[in-house]
Image (tube, helix red, strand yellow):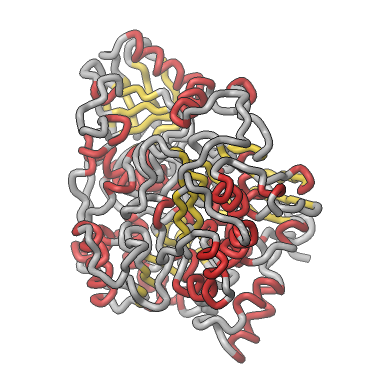
Amino acid sequence: MAYDKFTVLRSTAVPMPIENVDTDQIIPARFLKATERKGFGDNLFRDWRYNNDDTPKSDFVLNNPTYSGKILVGGKNFGSGSSREHAAWAIYDYGFRCVVSSFFADIFRGNALNIGILPVQVSSEFLEKIFAAIEADPNTELEVNLPEQTITLLATGESESFNINGYKKNNLINGYDDIDYLLSMKNEIEAFADTRPF
Amino acid sequence: MSTPTTLFDKVWDAHVVRHVEDGPDVLFIDRHFIHEVTSPVAFLGLEGRQAPVMFSGRTFATADHNTPTLNQHLPVADPLSANQLAALERNAAKYNISHWGLGHIKNGIVHVVGPENGITLPGMTIVCGDSHTSTHGAFGAIAFGIGTSEVEMVLATQCIMQPKPKKMRISVNGTIGKGVLPKDVILYIISQISASGATGYFVEYAGDVFRNMSMEGRMTVCNMSIEMGARGGMIAPDQTTLNYLNGRDLAPKGEQWDKLVPYWESLKTDEGATFDVDLTYDAANIEPQITYGTNPGMGTGVTRQIPQAEAVKDGAASYKKSLQYMGFSENESMIGKPVDFVFLGSCTNGRIEDFRAFASIVKGRQKADNVTAWLVPGSHIVEKQIKDEGILDVLTQAGFQLRQPGCSACLAMNEDKIPAGKYAVSTSNRNFEGRQGPGARTLLASPLVAAAAAVTGVVTDPRQLI
């Protein structure tokens, strides 16, 4: 599925200073029953966001009009647990294009990259600075520059670089996906398959 | 002499079709399991590209996540679930993929049916759109969970693109004590290194404790590798592995088997090979475990007290939020905590040994009146074993009923949901908030601890009932 190309993103951010945000919180299993990729944003953080009677929980950050933006900032070990790509779909469908944390779970990181969300891993010190800056001013903006691999707090100019491999970076900037790449090496794969013992 | 190499490197390197410069490896996948929840969108993607399935014989479909565990002969009541099951059946037929749907004699949880039918073999790469695919590492395979984009990738190209993880070895040496099961060993390890302590790594389990463990036990251990963040976990194949596989329906036979044995025997870490992290634990320190919080790293010995926030690696705020959700406080003893539900099953503990262990405690006792128990075999084959071995009679006499196979209350996608606020001692793998139903409170434990809770109605040390 095509996704928005990613180069430089300048946006306010939504703070979620909670550790070990697992994919069951991002999208509970009972909302995984669709056979199409549609509408998952409505159930993003469903049980943190809504009461049992479907009324919004006023103390949850997504229900607080003070905070908005295309960047979600989470505590360490973001996206742990289930491999459900629906978690990344829900985050994308809600409108986020970038998630910042000091630590991502492996499968979530891969899923995010595959659907056009940039996971930006920063030091825990920089993460604290981001949380503090948003708390001081919810309208403060972050700039995530993928070509330069930097994330900057625009108010103070404080910046940190982040890692991403050159292949994935190129994919995100151009909107490519892995399947295009793999289909281009079809003959090589078929020849390899012939060498497998089982 | 060649450089000493780890088991992980031997298997990984044998599957690299191409190294992408400044990028991931293109990894060939020997076996691909699919189920009804994470595959439909992958098939839609395939249709959108008008791409065929490259090797349909390498993919196996089973229905498990969303299936009812009662009255499976009737039409599935939930229209959304029924729709997903129908989509899997349709897609499997369209692309000529083997499909063990609801009601099929081989149906069951994907990570139970793969090994028990000999689809899983040592030295393979195995993926599935499910994080507990790590289970298959018990056979010396590299097995891990993938997202739906990658499911589409494997269908279209039989490959995925993965950066090579770092390597960790976890050795447990010595003899495990009475009443301590493989589940306790892995819960103990996770409690020591935390729910994120192995993120970025692939784990090899080594040492006497795993050497002496049955295949069922090894599967339980490898299954929960993901719960410490590891991409997967594996154990070198040995005679126990080969004895388990030999003669299974889809395992190689005769000459083909004989030819593979020397290769399989070479699949072990060479003396002198190095790991990025090498951890060792003493089996004598492991007692029956139970979790008290909302991630699998929040576990302790069943006779212990809930630790104080200062003593744990997670931030104090997250730790306290977790205890608040559970309705627990620091320093409380776990023994005697009331239990409302007991769940025996899942890809972690839904195999025959788990039912034997559970039965060993409930035999001659009665289910506690305050406990609702859901006992869910991992497959029809396990269900048949339970009946053939007389375990069903033991369970029935003790006041328990057996349900039909599926993932059930482990992730509560079907109607098997623990009600809000209720406590469930569960042999599954995750105690996340709402995992077993909105508001449900999960205490992860072994089948013995679950059985002890089921007959006493409170958290109990199973060693007192053995």
Q: Give the image location of residue B136, x and y in percent.
A: 54, 63
Which residue is the extreme one toward the right?
Answer: B174
Q: Give the image location of residue B379, x and y in percent.
A: 46, 69
Q: Give the image location of residue B128, x and y in percent.
A: 42, 61
Q: Is residue A97 above or below residue B13?
A: above
Q: Is residue B154 above or below residue A101?
A: below
- Quarter residue B244 falls in: bottom right
Nearest to the observer: residue B293 or residue B364: B364
Residue B292 in view in this figure:
yes
Q: Is residue B80 above or below residue B370?
A: below
Which residue is the extreme one toward the top?
Answer: A136
Picture residue at 54% right of the left edge, 64% below the top: B397
- Quarter residue B66 falls in: bottom left
* Horizontal side, residue B444 vs residue B300: left or right: left
Q: Give the image location of residue B362, x and y in percent.
A: 60, 58
Picture residue at 35% right of the left edge, 32% below the top: A99
Residue A161 in view in this figure:
no
- Quarter residue A174 falls in: top left
Picture residue at 47% right of the left edge, 65% below the top: B378
Q: Is residue B218 above or below residue B166?
A: below
* Horizontal side, residue B166 vs residue B68: left or right: right
- The quarter of the image holding the C terminus of chain B is bottom right
Picture residue at 74% right of the left edge, 50% below the top: B172
User: How many badges with numbers are in the image?
Assistant: 0
Which residue is the extreme one toward the bottom?
Answer: B255
- The quarter of the image holding the N terminus of chain B is bottom right
* Horizontal side, residue A36 vs residue B251: left or right: left
Nearest to the observer: residue B106 or residue B51: B106
Nearest to the observer: residue A96 or residue B211: B211
